[in-house]
Amino acid sequence: MLKKDGIWITGASSGIGKAVALEFAKIGCNVFISARRVHELERLKDEAGKSGENIFSFPCNVASSANVEQTFKKIANESEINCLINNAGVTSFKHAADNSVNEINDIINTNLLGSIYSIKSVLPTFIKNDSGTIINILSVVVKKNFTRSSVYAASKMGLLGYSNSLREEVRKHNIRIINVIPGATETSMWSQEIRKEKSNLMMNPESIARIIVSAYLQKDNLVTEEIVLRPITGDLA
């Protein structure tokens, strides 16, 4: 039965999203990957080897509500979607006074509104089916304050608030909402210099992906609502 599960992952071209896509493909799910970088989506399928047969590419810019709706309809024509994973995200490590309006819009439109658009697209189907799972990849910024992260923190805390409220609305429909809150993870969000210098202080996306898949596989009458993951050495300063 699991083999038929459809998993839609946004921001799947790299980092946690990519690792989650590969992990779900390994266990036989139909994995629908979305991102703006089309060539990276195709590369992911190639890297998956035999599991790549279970991965299907649907490019999407989640900052556009119309693009999200179009992408959802295309995927829904291919398969039922059982799980949405909101991983698309951008940031800018700047002090608040230095963020341009374009940077602010890009972060909020992608991280917050893009996730809400994606949830809104799948929600009618989940409600109709009386079943579904929404997994949001948030950030340690919802638990701890950092400098040069004000807009990014606003986007992630906004999604946390939205998701916690939504969870109460959809419990009666057996829809599970899981918020994953990772600390520093070795992804392209960090510069190559920082990754090279501090990789031993960061978590790897593959380990996080295995935990996410495990949470999804829990029985229907049980849900892990929040998963907080931190490097054993603590947060980066």
Image (cartoon, grey):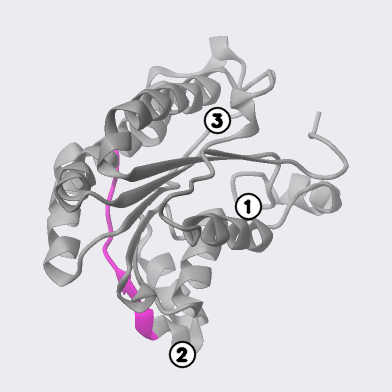
The mark closer to the camera, 3 or 1, is 1
Q: Which mark is residue 187?
A: 1
What span is in magenta? 53-63
Q: Secondary structure at mark 1?
A: loop
The answer to whether residue 65 is left or right of residue 232 is: left
Tell me the residue that label 2 is attached to.
50
Disc 3 marks a residue whose amino acid type is: Ser
Disc 2 marks a residue whose amino acid type is: Lys
Q: Secondary structure at mark 2?
A: helix
> Which residue is at a point 20% across and 64% down the rendered structure image?
80
> Which residue is at a point 30% across and 51% down the rendered structure image?
132
> Which residue is at a point 54% across and 54% down the rendered structure image?
215
The image quarter in which residue 140 lies: top right
Sequence-wise, the earlier of marks 2 and 3 is 2
- Quarter of the figure that contains the C terminus: top right
- Position in image of residue 189 (x %, y %): 59, 45
The mark closer to the camera, 1 or 2, is 2
How far apart in space, not on screen, are marks 2 and 3 (Cα)? 36 Å
Q: Is residue 122 above or below residue 159?
A: below
Q: Secondary structure at mark 3?
A: loop
Sequence-wise, the earlier of marks 3 and 1 is 3
Q: Which mark is residue 92?
A: 3
> Which residue is at a point 37% across and 31% down the rendered structure image?
167
Q: Which mark is residue 10?
A: none
The image quarter in which residue 136 lies: top left
